[in-house]
Amino acid sequence: MNKILLVIQREYLTRVKKPSFWILTIVVPILLAGVYAIPIIMAARPLEHAHVLVVDDTGLFQGQFRSGRDISYHEAGSIDYARRQLEQHDSLDAIVYIPARETTLPRDAYLYYRTDAPSMTVQGDVNSQLQEILRNRILLDVHGLTPDDYTMLTSTHIKLRTQDIETGRDSFLMIKTALGIILAMLVFVAVFMFGSQVMRGVMEEKTSRIVEVIVCSVKPFQLMMGKVVGIGLVGLTQFALWVLLSSFAVAGIQLTNADLFEQAARNSNRSEIATKGTEATTQYQTAQDQTAQYEAGEGIDRSIQDLIQGLSDINYSLIILLFIFYFVFGYLLYASLFAAAGSLVDNDTDSQQFTLPLTIPLLLSILLLPSMLNQPSGDLSVWLSIIPFTSPVAMLLRIPFGVPAWQVLLSMLLLLATFPLCIWAAARVYRSAILRYGQKTTWRDVWHILKRK
């Protein structure tokens, strides 16, 4: 046991002291905090107010453009006058020009600017208003709809909200989808990256023949397990630092944007309604009244509210615990197999025939991400999250959507039962092949090693 600890210590300290370890440790939390904060900050940040001149030679759009919070529209008599105004006043951003045509309806419109192109917000608003005004004109002229009739038709809007019937909570599908993809890709990259480090470490020691000196005092199994556990501890250390630094970063973001998150918490609480009896009716009506007041203009923007509420409703503690479990045991499973593959070959070229079949389950789970996202509770997703070789990726993808407890427990038990078998098989191969040089090893040779008593 002491010898395994010495190997673990050597592997751990060697890699933790590398600058690349600390660079990656610092960069990843910054990226995660950015992913968390940028959508909220950008959505809450007020846009610069834009001023746009409208020149309408057709007369169909005269006085029809509506100014808003971010954009103001001003009528201009002619394109020459508007051009001079744009050149003389820096406060003007663009000109909307609708030229007259021989046909009844215009086919083209132009958005002129000087020096800096208008923002996507300005371009989108101009385009949508052009389409809306032209559509209104056709409906009024052809179908005889009055402005009040058309306003009533176009102002109707119903928003589909996917909610849990027991808690009344929204599903926040887009947020859960993004979180599931991030977790799945993160565990895939981590298992593959640290597993590859194990294989490269074994190959380097074998190629340089240092292993011949090491095995004089350490048994091959002790050497393999020390290397696997040592590099695994490096990964856990890095993940722990990522969680710690990311938590500090997220806490800082929440403190600097306290009003946004307090409003989200209040709205999240009001959406939790009872589901039985008169209490449910009362609470539901109260929630509806509060929501109506909110959507009428009270509080922060609805899209920001939904985003913050969706992020706040995530059970981060459960996700972190399950991520650690699936990373640890998924890593032990694959790292032992990678160590065995490294002991079978002398160079990177020969390693391809062993590493590719080993990584096919992980690659398959990544390729099937779209199908699993389409049906997180479908048969394909369930089976992939239970099979030990794909469960680290598939289960973490499903966790944000909610997974029955029995499926999580079954997946964890199967993974716990499988990784010792992989370590046993890898140890047999490693012990037999680590001192073998200059021989082309095939899968048949591996099978013979496993069968040998």
Image: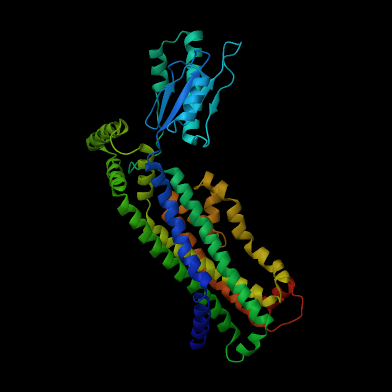
Q: Is residue 365 visible?
A: yes
Quadrant position of residue 164: top left
Looking at the picture, how far across and down is residue 262, in whole percent? Answer: 28, 47
Q: Is residue 170 visible?
A: no
Looking at the picture, how far across and down is residue 84, in whole percent? Answer: 49, 25
438 sits to left or right of 57: right
Q: Where, quadrant-wise, is the C terminus in this rendering?
A: bottom right
258 sits to left or right of 231: left
Furthest toward the bottom, the residue is 216
Q: Is residue 176 above or below residue 138?
A: below
Quadrant position of residue 195: bottom right
Looking at the picture, how far across and down is residue 12, in whole percent? Answer: 50, 78
Q: Is residue 140 above or below residue 304?
A: above
Q: Nearer the viewer, residue 274 or 170?
A: 170
Looking at the picture, how far across and down is residue 58, in whole percent? Answer: 53, 13
Q: Residue at x 56, y 22 (%)?
A: 109
Q: Residue at x 39, y 32 (%)?
A: 70
Q: Residue at x 74, y 72 (%)?
A: 444
266 sits to left or right of 30: left
